[in-house]
Image: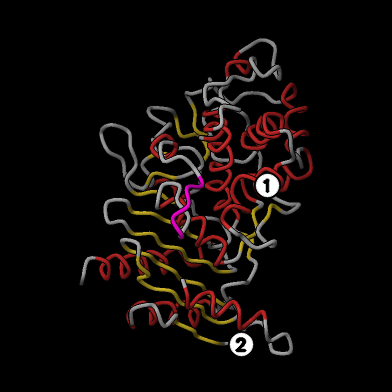
Amino acid sequence: MHSRRLILSLIATAPLLPLWPAGATVVDPSSPDLPSVTGLIQAAIRRHRLDGVAAIAHHRGRVLYRGYFGDIGPGTAIPVASASKWVAGLVIMALVAQGRLRLDLTLGQAGLIATGPAAGITLAQLMSHTSALPAIGPVRQDRRYPTPAAAARGLAEMDLIGQPGQVFAYAGVSMQVAAYLAEQAGGADWNSLFRRLIADPLGLSPACRWGDKWGVAGGLIATPDDYERILLLIASQGLSSDGRRILPADIFPVMERDRIGGANRKEQPEAAEMMKGYGIGLWCESLLPDGSCPIISSPGAFGTLPRIDRTRDLAILLMVKSRLPTVADDWRSIVRALTQAAEGG
């Protein structure tokens, strides 16, 4: 952590220099030398003409790899698309831990829907895409339901695509509604809740916030340094890097449990076919018989991939300004190489 802070301080104290040298490759000196990983990243940059990549991994509480390539440095603000969902889940679960929300709270109990199947939709279903609310694309969502309040007001006009709890439809509107419930319970707008519950306690930069596009499910902007801190908070089950308790440990097993079950997968990205389930704001890459998810991730359409393998105590973060389908195969190769390094091979 010291070397990362040194890099950030050098950037902050040198305003007359470029914030990050164009074409630079900087591997943190606290990071082990993993030339195979560096080579894979450099090959991906050349193959896809990427502007830059941040690649970070922690194994058993130690830095396994941290490198910044091209025009992406530790303080570069990047829209992370669906990697937002995992962070949104943290905000929701922080309010659950405080007793301000319940995962079994229904829209009927919240006073948003009086009668019918939609009245029985729970907060857990909203956050796991099993609510049966329509799967509206981000552009249409921005136009019709740009805020959590707009989504809540629009509930009456939404036609369910099935029975709540019986269909899985990966989209953003349901999380917009969940965010409205959070705003009502927390007494503040979504960004203010995020700052109060997560960002300020972790010391995240002012750049780390939800923007004006893609909603709660896809609108987070974060630097690699910001998202690394968030990922390590999750990996340590609620502890900051300096050992402070930010979130209760018992919320993480609740988040990291499959909630699709036998539901019909009606709408999902093509790449999600290999995913075994979905929890509260996160994908289950693997699934145990008890429903727990030992390998979890939340990849975003613009190429950000946060991933935790609890079986190996390995956290990986890859960030880029691209499209996920473009770099997906490269990311899988880099994840395999980092996993092999963590295993000593």
**Residue 258's x, y, as percent?**
39, 35
Residue numbers of the magenta segment:
242-246
Q: How crowded is mark 1: few (under 14 residues within 10 Å), some or many (20 or more)?
A: many
Which quarter of the figure is the C terminus placed in? Answer: bottom left
The amino acid type, in three-letter code, at marker 2 is Pro
Identify the residue at horizontal 53%, vertical 20% (top origin).
163
| Left or right of residue 29: residue 193 | right
Q: What element carries label 2?
A: loop
- Residue 44 location (% of width, % of height): 46, 77
Q: Is residue 72 magenta?
A: no
Of residue 171 and residue 316, the one placed in the foreground of this image is: 316
Mark closer to the observer (1, 2): 2
Residue corresponding to mark 2: 21
Task: Classify residue 308 by image quadrant.
Answer: bottom left
Q: Which residue is under mark 1?
A: 138
The label on residue 16 is none
Q: How crowded is mark 2: few (under 14 residues within 10 Å), some or many (20 or more)?
A: some
The type of residue carrying mark 1 is Pro
Q: Is mark 1 on a helix, strand or loop?
A: helix
User: Would residue 140 appear left or right of 334 to someone viewing this image?
Assistant: right
Q: Do the residues labelled 1 and 2 touch (CB within 8 Å)?
A: no
